[in-house]
């Protein structure tokens, strides 16, 4: 089943807010605006920072910015950082022995979902 976690949802909200701004954005301002736990959003921001998707400036006037142009940040890459595998379940595991006959269908579904998301960027979140 394909379902975005709260972690991925909040990560996309953060990236969307950063893409809208040409200046440093604080996690607390995004959290307050979107009624999100600032502590949880901060953890997500740290994951995105470690992955090189966003950058941070420490201090009172600090905050986060996108590490590169929003058109160059692929959403599939972002979701894999925040989610790992997008499709989970036995049918999507590498060495699963299919008994229902739907193995090809599930492989095709994975390819189509990843291809669709792979064509999208952070810029698509704000247009």
Image: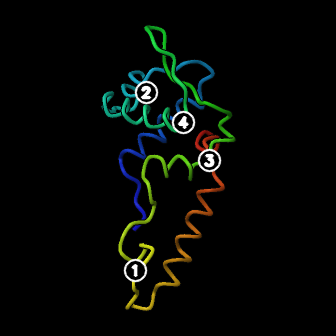
Q: CA distance from mark 4 to mark 2?
A: 10 Å
Question: What residue is shown with label 1?
Answer: 96
Q: Residue at x 45, y 87 (%)?
A: 102
**Where 86 sits versus 16, above or below?**
below
> Which numbered circle lies on residue 16?
4
Q: Which quadrant: the C terminus?
A: top right
Q: Is residue 115 left or right of residue 38?
A: right
Disc nearer the start of the sequence (2/1): 2
Indicate the secondary structure of the residue bearing disc 4: helix
Between marks 2 and 1, how big is the CA–CA gap?
41 Å
* Closer to us: 105 or 13: 105
Relative image position of residue 98 (x, y in whole percent): 40, 87
Q: Outermost residue, front direction?
A: 95
* 120 up-or-down from 71: above or below: below
Report if the CB atoms under discs 3 and 2 are less than 8 Å apart: no
Q: Which residue is mark 2?
A: 30
Residue lying at 34% horizontally and 33% vertically, measured from the top left: 36
Label 1: how many Cα within 10 Å (few below 14, some 14–19, many 20+): few
For marks 1 and 3, the one nearer the N-term is 3
Q: Position of residue 112 (x, y in %)?
A: 59, 69
Q: SS class of the residue under badge 2?
A: helix
Cα distance in 3D space between marks 3 and 4: 13 Å
Sequence-wise first label, 1 or 4: 4
Q: Residues within 10 Å of mark 3 (few under 14, many from 20)?
A: some
Task: Find the distance from the CA under tag 3 to the CA under tag 2.
Answer: 21 Å
**Residue annotated with mark 3:** 74
Residue at point 42% right, 24% down? 27
Which residue is painted at 48% across and 78% down in the image? 106
Residue 68 pos. (x, y %): 66, 32
């Amino acid at each position: 089943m394909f379902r975005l976690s709260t972690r991925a949802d909040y990560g996309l909200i953060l990236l969307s807010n950063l893409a809208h701004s040409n200046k440093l954005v604080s996690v607390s301002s995004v959290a307050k605006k979107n009624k999100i736990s600032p502590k949880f959003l901060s953890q997500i921001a740290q994951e995105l920072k470690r992955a090189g998707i966003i950058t941070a400036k420490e201090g009172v006037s600090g905050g986060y910015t996108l590490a590169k142009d929003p058109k160059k940040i692929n959403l599939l890459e972002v979701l894999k950082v925040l989610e790992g595998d997008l499709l989970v379940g036995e049918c999507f595991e590498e060495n699963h022995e299919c008994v229902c006959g739907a193995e090809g269908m599930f492989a095709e579904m994975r390819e189509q979902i990843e291809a669709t998301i792979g064509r999208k960027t952070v810029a698509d979140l704000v247009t």
